[in-house]
Image (cartoon, coloured by chain):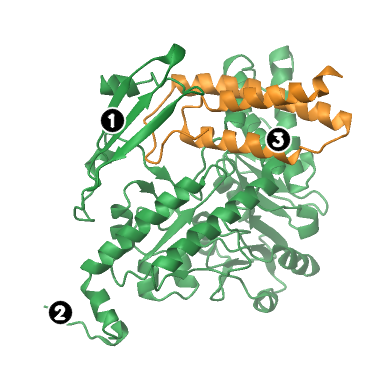
């Protein structure tokens, strides 16, 4: 009975529903009993076994490889990696997957015309969100592809210097590395301890042969917001192109490319509750920015990016942008409240927790806390917090065991860099989610610290940095 | 106009809340309930009939979208999330 009860027969609960949750004291098993009345008189006794046994934190969870039907899904707190798609976005996309399947570039029949209308409407929606003209938006397959157009060979003959920061996203850093191999010179600007760049240093670094400055608006790992308006004005005054990776910022903070004097901007669909596999690139027309097409073919997207524009995806992106614009203030308010709640609760219970990044110039939904587990790495805490989906760095670097390069760039010590995790809060996070995460986090950190001999030493007042570790 | 009457608006609110409770996905359900409540609360004192009409039409469209998405959610349901307890009324 129990597996069937969960297998797609989740009856909706009407007004007279209530549920009681029994939780055993030891926390080893949970029983959920649902009682529904009227038309949905269905007794379902579901026994779920959430594995809360205090086992070794480093044991990999085999349950994750093949989830059983009676296992509960973890809580999602990793909104920087990706976001759940808003139901309104899916609602906008589905007609174009089912019935309106025409190619938007077909000019001879109604299927093409209706797809094209939808595509242009989506273009306007994206452009409105960033304060641009629809003719300046190019649809791509994501922010990474958009960045390939931007971090590229502008006026190669004359200008061969590019400036970026040490905390950029991997795709930008990787592109810069390849350009270096081709003969360009790249300066990686250091950041201050709070994660922000020094404007004076940027001004001094700009040379007559600088072609591009690329600085991300909101960092995906520590959440700091760079002073893009000042940087934009500075670059315009020195006649240097300015590209900003706004994948994490679009839809979360108000953006205006004309106020900010941005020449190129990358937008990602799946970071704003849109579909994965689509993004946009903003290319300024006045003054004109000439970029080279990476994909050649039928001349779609003004010759910049040939290839059939995926109508359902761009309709989803457009809908996501429109929703983000409408909900910007509301989401910002909710996220700020939840973020403050999370940080205050954790900091009040666990001593020696450090929040990375500038406290003011930031987007509140991206929190990175260095818990100072004192050489107990973040993997221990993430493994212990099996019921919460968290991460310790960007998704692209999550496979590596090295601490995040962003933390190194802001000058965090080795122990802080190794023992930090990242909380992401978004549109769909609730108070209960935050409370549950905080409770589990506090419980696990206390338990791990109790087991840690290094924590005992710290409590006795020994300075860990003064210890000379011997090898056996 | 009939659509601007208080009773109509209240009935629309009730229908939105009722449909939102049917979302099988925890994220969508909690968001929809919260957003509908806050949305109606912030527009409590709107007087302009044109704005009212627009808001009511928007609410009707959202109601239709919620109904569709609830059905889709049921077709592709997954296991419950760890924090799920039934929302209190």
Which chain is depicted green? A
Q: Which mark is residue B40?
A: 3
Q: CA distance from mark 2 to mark 1?
A: 47 Å
Q: Are marks 1 and 3 on the same chain?
A: no
Q: Label 1 lies in what chain? A: A
Find residue B28 and report its horizontal and vertical position in percent.
53, 33
Is A104 rendered above or below residue B29?
above
Disc 1 packing (10 Å; few <14; some 14–19; many ≥20): some
Q: Is residue A303 visible?
A: no
Q: Which mark is residue A471?
A: 2
Q: CA distance from mark 2 to mark 3?
A: 66 Å
Disc 2 packing (10 Å; few <14; some 14–19; many ≥20): few
Q: Nearer the viewer, mark 2 or mark 3?
A: 3
Identify the residue under disc 1: A70
Q: Are marks 2 and 3 on the same chain?
A: no
- When asked about the image quadrant of residue B48, the answer is top right
Q: CA distance from mark 1 to mark 3?
A: 37 Å
As helix, strand or loop, the secondary structure at mark 3 comes to helix
Report the side of A197 relative to A50 (left or right).
right
As helix, strand or loop, the secondary structure at mark 2 comes to loop
Q: Is residue A246 visible?
A: yes
Which chain is depicted orange? B
Along the line of sight, the residue nearer the viewer: A75 or A264: A75
Along the line of sight, the residue nearer the viewer: A451 or A138: A451
Along the line of sight, the residue nearer the viewer: A197 or A339: A339
Report the side of B61 relative to A71 (left or right).
right
As helix, strand or loop, the secondary structure at mark 1 comes to loop
Q: Earlier in the sequence, mark 2 or mark 1?
A: 1
Q: Nearer the viewer, mark 1 or mark 3?
A: 3
């Amino acid at each position: 009975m129990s597996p069937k009860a969960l297998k797609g027969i989740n009856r909706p609960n009407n007004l007279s529903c209530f549920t009681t949750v029994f939780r055993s004291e030891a926390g080893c098993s949970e029983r959920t009993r649902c009682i529904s009345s009227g038309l949905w008189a269905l007794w379902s006794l579901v026994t779920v076994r959430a594995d809360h046994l205090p086992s070794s934190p480093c044991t990999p969870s085999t349950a994750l490889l093949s989830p059983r039907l009676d296992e509960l899904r973890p809580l999602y707190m990793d909104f920087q990696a990706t976001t759940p798609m808003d139901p309104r976005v899916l609602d906008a996309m589905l007609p174009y997957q089912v019935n309106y399947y025409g190619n938007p570039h077909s000019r001879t029949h109604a299927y093409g015309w209706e797809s094209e209308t939808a595509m242009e409407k989506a273009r306007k929606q994206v452009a409105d969100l960033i304060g641009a003209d629809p003719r300046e938006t190019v649809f791509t397959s994501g922010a990474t592809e958009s960045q390939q157009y931007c971090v590229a060979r502008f006026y190669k003959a004359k200008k061969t210097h590019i400036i970026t920061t040490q905390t950029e996203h991997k795709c930008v850093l990787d592109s810069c590395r390849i350009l270096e191999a081709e003969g360009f010179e790249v300066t990686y600007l250091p950041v201050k301890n709070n994660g922000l760049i020094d404007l004076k240093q940027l001004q001094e670094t700009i040379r007559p042969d600088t072609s591009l400055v690329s600085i991300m608006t909101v960092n995906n790992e520590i959440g700091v917001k760079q002073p893009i308006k000042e940087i934009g004005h500075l670059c315009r005054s020195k006649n240097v192109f300015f590209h900003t990776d706004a994948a994490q910022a679009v839809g979360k903070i108000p953006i205006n490319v004309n106020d900010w004097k941005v020449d190129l901007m990358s937008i990602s669909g799946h970071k704003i509750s849109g579909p994965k596999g689509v993004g946009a690139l903003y290319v300024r027309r006045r003054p004109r920015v000439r970029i080279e097409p990476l994909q050649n073919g039928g001349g779609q997207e003004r010759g910049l990016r040939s290839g059939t524009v995926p109508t359902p995806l761009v309709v989803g992106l457009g809908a996501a942008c429109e929703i983000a614009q409408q909900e910007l203030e509301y989401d910002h308010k909710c996220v700020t409240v939840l973020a403050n709640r999370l940080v205050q609760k954790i900091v009040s219970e666990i001593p020696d927790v450090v929040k990375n990044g500038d406290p003011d110039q930031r987007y509140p939904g991206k929190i990175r806390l260095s818990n100072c587990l004192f050489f107990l790495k973040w993997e221990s805490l993430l493994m212990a917090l099996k019921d919460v989906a968290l991460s310790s760095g960007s998704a692209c670097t999550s496979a590596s065991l090295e601490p995040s390069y962003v933390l190194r760039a802001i000058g965090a010590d080795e122990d802080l860099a190794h023992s930090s995790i990242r909380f992401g809060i978004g549109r769909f996070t609730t108070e209960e989610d935050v409370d549950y995460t905080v409770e589990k986090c506090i419980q696990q950190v206390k338990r791990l610290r109790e087991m840690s001999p290094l924590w005992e030493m710290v409590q006795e007042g020994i300075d860990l940095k003064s210890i000379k570790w011997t090898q056996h | 106009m009939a659509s601007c009457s208080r009773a109509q608006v209240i009935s629309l609110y009730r229908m939105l809340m009722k449909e939102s409770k049917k979302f099988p996905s925890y994220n969508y359900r909690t968001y929809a309930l919260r957003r509908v409540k806050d949305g109606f609360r912030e527009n409590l004192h709107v007087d302009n009939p044109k704005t009212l009409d627009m808001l009511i039409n928007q609410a009707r469209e959202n109601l239709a979208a919620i109904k569709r998405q609830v059905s889709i959610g049921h077709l592709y349901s997954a296991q419950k999330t760890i924090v799920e307890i039934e929302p209190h009324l």
